[in-house]
Amino acid sequence: MTTLSAKAAPGTALCAAEPATEPATGSVGELSTAGTTAAPVLAVRGVRISDQVTDREIVHGVSFELTPGKTVGIVGESGSGKTLTCRATLGILPPHFEVSAGSIEIAGTDIATLTPQQWTALRGATISAVFQDPASYLNPSIRVGAQIAEVIRVKKGLKRREARHRAVELLQAVQLRDPELVYGQYTHELSGGMLQRVLIAVAIAADPQILIADEATTALDVTVQAEILDLLAELREQAGLALVVVSHDLAVVAQLCDEVLVMREGEVVEQGPTSDVLHRPRHEYTRLLIAEHDQYGLEKFLTPLTPQETS
Amino acid sequence: MTTEQTQGQRSAEAGADGRAVLEVTGLDVHYGPRRQRRRALHDVSLSVAPGETVGIIGETGSGKSTFARTVLGLVRASAGRIVIGGEDVGAYGSRQWRRLRRRGVVQYVFQDPLRSLDPDLTVEESLIEPLLIQGVARQEAADRARTFLARVQLSEELLDRLPGELSGGQRQRVAVARALVTEPKLVILDEPVSALDSANRVQILQILKDLRAAGVALVFISHDLGSVAGVADRIAVLYQGELVEVGAARDVITDPRHVYTRLLVGSAPTLRSASADRAERDRLRALLHA
């Protein structure tokens, strides 16, 4: 994992060589432009989400920008609002939830202005997502290959035979060992890791610019999780895909992300470049997440993050 | 059928002096009817010394829960020896097992506390029941229940609650307290923190560390190398039903020998740079699947 191994090397010299970014000093919800000049493919600005029934605000302001080939991570536990933020970005908030303030722009278009038809055109082709339980997003009685081919036919307007050919290519691209065989299989014949690869194949079928991975590896074994994270990193490098990685585990996010948002109870309590958040956590909750790894994780036996932290 | 056969076996074997709380030798477990018998465990040997915490790490299908269930007498072994606190329990029938469990020598905590707690018993009833069975007087049992509730950092107010009225973290702590009241020599914990959030996870792991300090032997079974590394003195790695590596926690994490252990350690997300890079993981995967 290039990003992390370069940044988290012992000694802090590498951190000083980071692109000159302003750590989001204390104030939450500040835009962190991560030293890039490319136009953002996704811009989330001060987004607040409310439950209309109880009239309660659930998410209290989330802001970030994402440029091609970059990755933003959102860390938080269940109920922190990370999934609602993703769903707002995809235009699929649950009934009676609404974006009550702020704006979301996908490839320059404010999503508040989109008609349902425009949304349909945008999803898959520009922004796409994978979630925790891959099996529940596939039809158990249709061969998985046919489900991928359908997306390609609808989204890319390819003919049946071309779509099939492309689907096999995609199964190959997500590193399934025997793509032709998997094409003809049903969901119950595939393992969790294989299903998540199939879902990623569906998600990237229409060449989106943005992929949201919401707890996409949570239910998987560690070795399989690493395979999926490696695959996402590769897609990012090869296709310039911009990623939003959502996890309850700070370490998962740290592997992959340029910038991290730490959320708790609807609030972004900390936000900044990954190395800053890991090396100089400001919020008590972020420190708890790091301490958890330091005292009760592999990190106990690894070189400390920074020399002064060896308490 | 000796431990030397297992690859990556290290010298750091405890309990060799015969004082082991748990001594498992050459354990084989099969499931299914004769025709489609599937091997779940093969030639597993492991010993746990008094006060020692041994972590067993394994992924889906590795046989780690089968190991726990076999040691607890819930699954019958097809070969091998299991000695708990000096008693060879391999040939025990259900009555002998019941007697052993009643004595409270070995206790257990599962991932889902609702499986180790009776949903119809209040916290207090759950805690005192094993003591009453042992013949402890009610008043003394109630006092012990309070002591152990405090040990897992729960308030006495929870004594009248049913498991369903507690949060997941509180429930798991009650399950730990229930496992402790009889002051067992050995506690088997199967994925005790996997369903918990960070704060609760840390709390349970801290309680386990305190337990070790109090001299209870623990077998901590998990798919999460991180939590195992956090509490275990030694780590045993189960892969496809076989123990491929056993050693001091630090050695297994910093210098894994077996290819699978190397992949496992290299795959675990950390906040540091130590996990292997992508190319190294690809190489290990190729090696493992070859």
Image (spheres, rainbow, N blue to C red):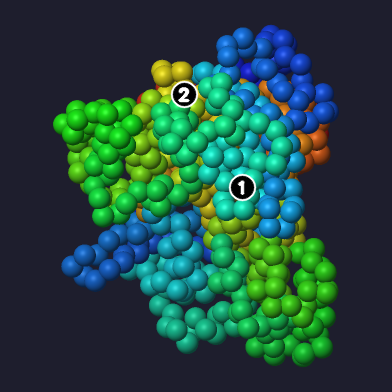
| Residue A95 position within the rendered picture, expressed as x and y whole percent measured from the top left | 57, 53
State if disc 2 and disc 1 touch (CB < 8 Å): no
Q: Is residue B248 left or right of residue A30?
A: left
Please tell me whether mark 2 sits on a helix, a strand or a loop.
loop
Q: Quadrant of residue B126?
A: bottom right
Q: Residue at x 44, y 68 (%)?
A: B70
Q: Nearer the viewer, residue B170 or A301?
A: B170
| Residue A64 position within the rendered picture, expressed as x and y whole percent measured from the top left | 66, 27
Question: Gap between marks 1 and 2, in whole Å?
Answer: 36 Å
The kind of residue tagged 1 is: Ser
The kind of residue tagged 2 is: Gln
Q: Residue at x 63, y 61 (%)?
A: B217
Q: Nearer the viewer, residue A75 or A289?
A: A75
**The N terminus of chain B - image quarter:** bottom left
Q: Residue at x 62, y 9 (%)?
A: A37
| Residue B279 position within the rendered picture, expressed as x and y whole percent measured from the top left | 42, 22
| Residue A286 position within the rendered picture, expressed as x and y whole percent measured from the top left | 74, 37
Q: Is residue B202 visible?
A: no
- Which residue position holds label 2? A209
Q: Quadrant of residue B78?
A: bottom left
Please tell me whether mark 1 sits on a helix, a strand or a loop.
helix
Q: Nearer the viewer, residue A231 or B276?
A: A231
- Nearest to the eye among marks 1 and 2: give it: 2
| Chain label for disc 1 | B
- Which residue position holds label 1? B227
Q: Is residue B217 left or right of residue B75?
A: right
| Chain label for disc 2 | A
Q: Residue furthest left?
A: A161
